[in-house]
Structures are given as C-alpha cells and as structure tokens.
Amino acid sequence: MGSRTALVEDLMERFPHVPREAVFKEDLLRGGVAFDDSALSDNEDGDVKPKSYFIFSFDHGTLPELGEAALRRPPEEIILTGGPYDLRRTVVSVRVNPSSPYRVAASEDGVLGLYLDGKRISDVGVPPMPEYYRHKLSNGKSVMEVAPTIQWGYLIYLTVFRVCQYFGAKEECQYCDINHNWRQHKEAGRPYTGVKDVDEVLEALEIIDRYDTAKVSTAYTLTGGAITSKLQGRDEADFYGMYAKAIEEHFPGRWIGKVVAQALPRDDVQRFKDYGVQIYHPNYEVWDEYLFKLHCPGKERYVGRAEWHKRILDSAEIFGARNVIPNFVAGVEMAEPFGFTTVDEAIASTTEGLRFFMSQGITPRFTTWCPEPTTPLGKANPQGAPLEYHIRLLEAYRSTMEDFGLSSPPGYGPPGPGNAVFSVSSFMDSLPANEVTEEVPAV
C-alpha cells in the first residue's frame, strides 16, 4: 500500500457499504493516535474533559512512555467532522500512541485537526469539561475518579473494583491490562481507588444528577475485575449488585442500569435482576474454542467455555434476550502466535459466534482490541489486527443482525453514522440510523 492513507482509501473503496467514518474510527481505535502538546488537556483544571482511564489503559505505551501526554492528559474522546472525506460527526475513544501516523494538532489559528501522513483529514472536536467534574466529593475526591462519564457524556462508567482476581500468567486474560493499569496509576501517584465505597458512588451520582440538567447521562455501567472467591465478604453477584440496589433506591428510573460481570449461574443472575439491573453483559471475549482457552485461561479454569455460553443463554430467560449483550474483543482472533492467519478464517469464526447468539435473540457487541504493551498479546502484536478484519467485521455484524431481524441493542444511545456516541468500536456507527432502539426494561 505504501502509506496508511492508501490503505484506508483502498478499504473505503472495496467496502462501500461500511461508513467511511467507521473505517477511520476503527483504524484510530486499533492503532491509536498521537497528540501534539497543543492538543492536550489541562487535566481537571481546564476546559476540556480529560481522559479518565476508566478501566483499562487503552494506550500503546505505559505512562512513562507517553511523554507530555502522561502529565497533561489527552481528551477522553474526540469528534471527527468534515475534511476532504466530508466525515459525519464521529465519536472516538482516545488511545494514545506517540508513533501513530495519525496526529491531533492545532493549526496556526488554533483549530484542532486530525492529520494522517501529514495531511489534515478532519476537524477535531473535544469534549467540554462537564460542570459536574468541577465539583468535589465531601472527602475531596473528584467525580472523574469515582464516576467518570464516557461516550460524550451518555454513560457513567462505574469501575467499582479496579483489579481482577484472575491474576498472573495462568489466569489473566491475555489481552487485558486492568491489573497493570491499576499498578501504573498507583506508581505514578495518581488517585485510583481500588474498591469504591457505595456512599462515594452515590455522592458522585448526586453531583452528576444535580448538574447534568440536560440529562445527557442516560445510563450507568457497573463493572470491574472478576471475583473468584469473595470481596469484602461478598460474592460477585452480591458485590456488584449492592451498588445497583443502592443506586436504584436513591435514583429510581434516572439511568438505565447495566452490569458487566462474569457469566454467572442462574440464581446469581436473578439477584442482579432483583437488585435493579436492567441490562447484563456477560462477556464471552472470543468465540473460537481453542483461542478462548488460550486467551482467557482463568475463565476457562473457573467456568469453562461451554458453561459460559450456557449461562449466557440462561440469563436471557431472566433479563429477556434483548437485554443480554455480551461483549467480545474484536481482533484478538488474529493475534500471534496462535490466532487465525487470514482475515477470511477470523471473520468466519467470529461470524459463527454472532450467529450462535443472534439466532437466540441475543445481540453481542464488541470492543476494538487495543494491543496494550504490558499484555502478552499486546507485546506479541503491537500493530493489532489488520484493519481489513475490523472493516469486514462491521459488514458481517450488520448482515447477521439483518438475517435474524434484530436492531441495535438498548443502552448504547442512537445508532447510525453521524449519530452514534458509543466510542470504543464502530458497531453503532455502522447500523441504520432510522430505528427507535433505546428501549428500557420495565422497572
């Protein structure tokens, strides 16, 4: 191809049914973006909403390797518009890579733009500092530390347990840097609460509710590391469930409540439902049986792939199939040394998994893999998966949804290019814009 521009333009030409915005977005998500100093935030003291590191690093370098971007955080997300490709409004989660061919920089007149191979390809918008980030909790903690918002303010992301009990090479998911991200923030002296107190979460939500007068925040996600035994005397369903129960008692109906947890037994899943959770994300991570065992050794050891899938199907009987939305990490299918060696094979495998769940009325979603360098798969695959894989996945995803008569899942905001706010993959950007999808289960 010769240049990244040539690669992107070739894929846009070959896959005209995939929105051109999604091609750029997937490339930025899989490979990251560099920031000139002129495009960095002033952390929590400025006018731009800074990157919160809400669960993983989602960077292509450790904090010491990011230079000025480790001291002055980049924005949480960027919006692409206009430029020579006439891009519609596209929200992209920021993944920093100082060596990326993409760069965000200010022009001589101070206007931010995205540059590829030295050519300006779009205007760049950054999220304004929300009013609720300007107010501290009574103990001095920031709202951004306790209850950051992403997806352009749509989603409150509550990582209430910031490490994972799947620990070490024989248990940690091979693409996941949650434990390293915890360590690097603590080593850098940044505030990074390991287990968030329920009362702190409620206080942060009260501040958000008070100052988010436009009601931009529409959903919250409760998540964190896996709990294989007990945490504070509670099993996983009770630990995460107690936050949902408290939130729903204090803010009934204010937000769509979602929880990302392991695929748990039916009785545990019922407890989530009883606590007020409305959407359940029991992530299956990667479809292929061999790769699941290699990439998710802890999940294979404690639960097992077949049982994991059975539990996902069982949970649909409790939440309703539409409200069970398991995630997979798009791209690890092709990770060396054990992944598929061709895009055809990888897409065939991933589509098999999509068809398995969608045939049951369950609509998975996906996060575009970021090869963080402290993970085994990130070290072995610093370039991630080929861009063609990601573009063909968008095509296969939409086609499979259409085959089974499904529409975009609830809890993700509006679908369609120019409308979507989901920032860590382009699946919502690639779906039809003319659907009414934001249903909320009856409370």
Image (spheres, rainbow, N blue to C red):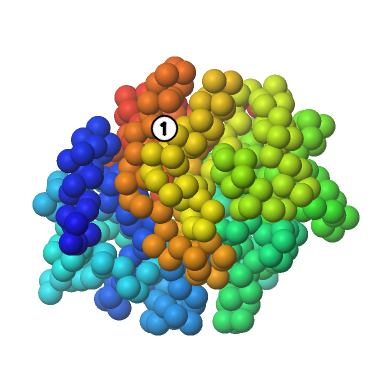
Q: Secondary structure at mark 1?
A: helix
Q: Is residue 372 left or right of residue 302?
A: left
How many circles with numbers are drawn on the protein? Answer: 1
Q: Give the residue drawn at x 27%, y 51%.
A: 24
Q: Give the residue drawn at x 60%, y 59%.
A: 174
Where is residue 361 shown, x and y percent of the image? 56, 21
Q: Is residue 435 left or right of residue 164?
A: left
Going by the picture, which residue comes out furthest to the right? 233
Q: Is residue 16 left or right of residue 84?
A: right
Amino acid carrying label 1: it is: Tyr
Query: Looking at the image, is 372 positioned above or below residue 267?
Result: below
Q: Give the residue drawn at x 57%, y 27%.
A: 357
Query: Looking at the image, is 25 positioned above or below residue 344?
Result: below
Where is residue 122 shown, x and y percent of the image? 19, 56
Q: Is residue 301 left or right of residue 121?
A: right
Q: Quadrant of residue 17?
A: top left
